[in-house]
Amino acid sequence: MKWKIAYAHDNADGSVTHVNTCVSIFSLIKRDVMDSFHHGSREHLHRYADEFAFRWVNCSITNRERMEVAIDQTEGNRLTYKGVRLREQAGAAN
């Protein structure tokens, strides 16, 4: 019996996704996490993936344009370090 393996998938928008693209993206994420963060935790894995996906989708624009898009996406979101401060205070109390 011969197995038919699908190495490509036709998407609804007419584009094609190849297995090699998926393997390539995973390899780049893995290398990026190890190079940039030196250690990856499961707790923050979704953040690593979100950052990489943002850069992958916006790879055709300049760094300045990418920065402007990132800043625009933070509108209405509060970025706080409350959790970090609480941990530091708890560590100082011990």
Image (cartoon, helix red, strand yellow):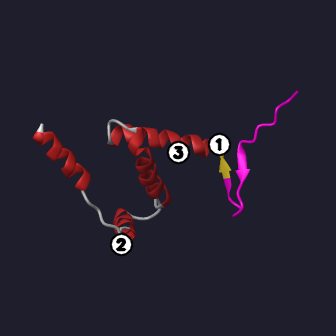
Residue that mark 2 sits on: 76
Mark 3 to mark 1: distance in Å?
A: 10 Å
The answer to which quarter of the image holds residue 91 is top left
Classify mark 2: residues with Cα within 10 Å, few (<14), some (14-19) or many (20+): few
Q: Magenta residues: mostly which secondary structure?
A: loop
N-terminal of the pair, mark 3 or mark 1, is 1
Asked whether, in this view, residue 16 is left or right of residue 57, the answer is right
Coordinates of residue 77 in the picture (x, y in percent): 35, 68
82 inside magenta stretch: no
Residue 68 figure quarter: bottom left
Q: Which is in the foreground here, disc 1 or disc 2? A: 2
- Helix, strand or loop at label 1? It is helix
Vertical comparison of 78 with 44: above or below? below
Q: Which mark is residue 25?
A: 3
Q: In the rendered image, which quarter is residue 54 located in?
A: bottom left
- Reading the image, the residue beneath label 1 is 19
Residue 46 in the image: state x and y as whole percent: 45, 48
Determine whether the residue tagged by mark 3 lies in a helix, strand or loop. helix
Amino acid type of the residue that numbered disc 2 sits on in the rendered structure:
Gly
Amino acid under label 1? Val
Residue 12 rendering spot, x and y as whole percentages: 72, 61
Q: Taking 41 as reference, is 57 left or right?
A: right
Spatial CA distance of label 1 from label 2 is 37 Å
Residue range of the region highlighted in magenta in the rendering: 1-16
- What residue is shown at x 46% (from left), y 43% (from top)? 29
